[in-house]
Image (tube, rainbow, N blue to C red):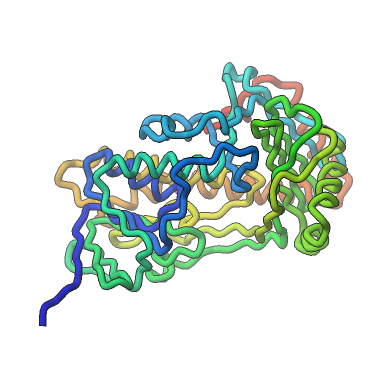
Amino acid sequence: MANNKKILTCDVAVVGAGLVGLAAVIALAEQGKRVALIDAQQKAVKQKVQKTQEFDARIYAITPSTEAFLKRLGVWAFVDLSRVNDVEAMALWSADEEQSLRLLAEDANLSKMACIAENDNLMQALWQKVEALDVSVLMGAPCRTIHYDHDVVVLDLENGSQICASLLVAADGAHSFVRQQLAIATKTKAFNQTALVANYRIEKAHGNIARQWFGAHETLAFLPLSLKQISIVWAVEAELAQALLNLTDEALAEQVQIRSNNVLGELKPASQTFSFALKQVTANQLIADRVVLIGDAAHQVHPMAGEGANLGFRDVIGLESLIAGAHVMQDIGEFSFLRRYERARISDILGMNILTTGLDSLFAFESTAIKNIANFGMQQLDKHPGMKNILIQQAIA
């Protein structure tokens, strides 16, 4: 009986066709690697972002370093820039709005601190670049098992196909199949918070300013969009979130308006409201034999930092750099070689975890003395351009 199993051999197999997975495919294919992209879902991204006034609810604050990376990959040329809005300043308020801190791009001799882009816009740009490359794409192909055969990792798909690769890149999200198959444990911190995400039309101009309020186990962020709109992320304790979700869209808009001290005037709903539980999840290891974890498969962080997507793109930059610098005879799946990626990335990931957990804890203290210290700290920072410059440089890294 003939064996009809389809076997595909490649240098790198990337599992997961999200933003980070697609970026990894492009970065490694541009190095001349034979790359295969595998995803359980059928391709759903629109070929062209529709010219409407309705924005995707999934919004990202892209740092200048991430933008530069996407430009270098040739992806940014496909982004619809009419739907991208620059962030020229950040305004931060402490608990009870007792003290504010404003960070201006011009303070650090920058034209902008970030830009706000939609998931759909970035996805279609990444896909256009992928389709211009010689990449094997297998969509709607769920993975079944992972095993090893001498010097390759073998990925068995439910359709009977088999992928043999020197390196497997897991970019398959927070519930990563690859991570679970390899029994890589995770550390999880539950915040008992839910994030509400929605877009609003605004009465007053946002001035290209990203705004954020910090409270006791609560953050509210306003991200400036074009067409006189904003995207909000409101992280509150789970019980309050449920009460807010029970409101009409208009009533919720009023609550957001009140919480933001009416800074942008009347808010009118411009999208559905979405919600998701917040937790911090970090894989105990970022590599296994011939496997590397990137993006949400490796880490999830609190949205307070606004760094989830940028952190994932920095994973790709780290992996790209490692492989680019390898000797021509280097086995790119070798464990000791991949350890260099893990060592290079762990400090960035842990630093982000400490930052978000620390800020959440600081503003959650009921102690008046602690709150005064937090407010005093923001007040002192506001008076020192040098320290503000350092903060800006950290924010855009």
Which residue is painted at 61% across and 39% down in the image? 52
Q: Nearer the viewer, residue 7 or 96?
A: 7
Which residue is painted at 47% across and 61% down in the image? 284
- Is 208 situated left or right of 377 in this image? left
Residue 140's spot in the image, x, y percent? Answer: 38, 63
Q: Quadrant of residue 374?
A: top right
Residue 269's spot in the image, x, y percent? Answer: 76, 45
Q: Quadrant of residue 40?
A: bottom left
Residue farthest toward the front in the current orientation of the protein: 51
Classify the position of the N terminus by image quarter. bottom left
Which residue is painted at 63% across and 28% down in the image? 87
* Relative vertical location of residue 318 with respect to residue 171 in this rendering, above or below: above
Q: Nearer the viewer, residue 260 or 328?
A: 260
Residue 146 seen by the camera: no
* Relative vertical location of residue 77 with respect to residue 157 in this rendering, above or below: above
- Is 156 situated left or right of 328 in this image? right
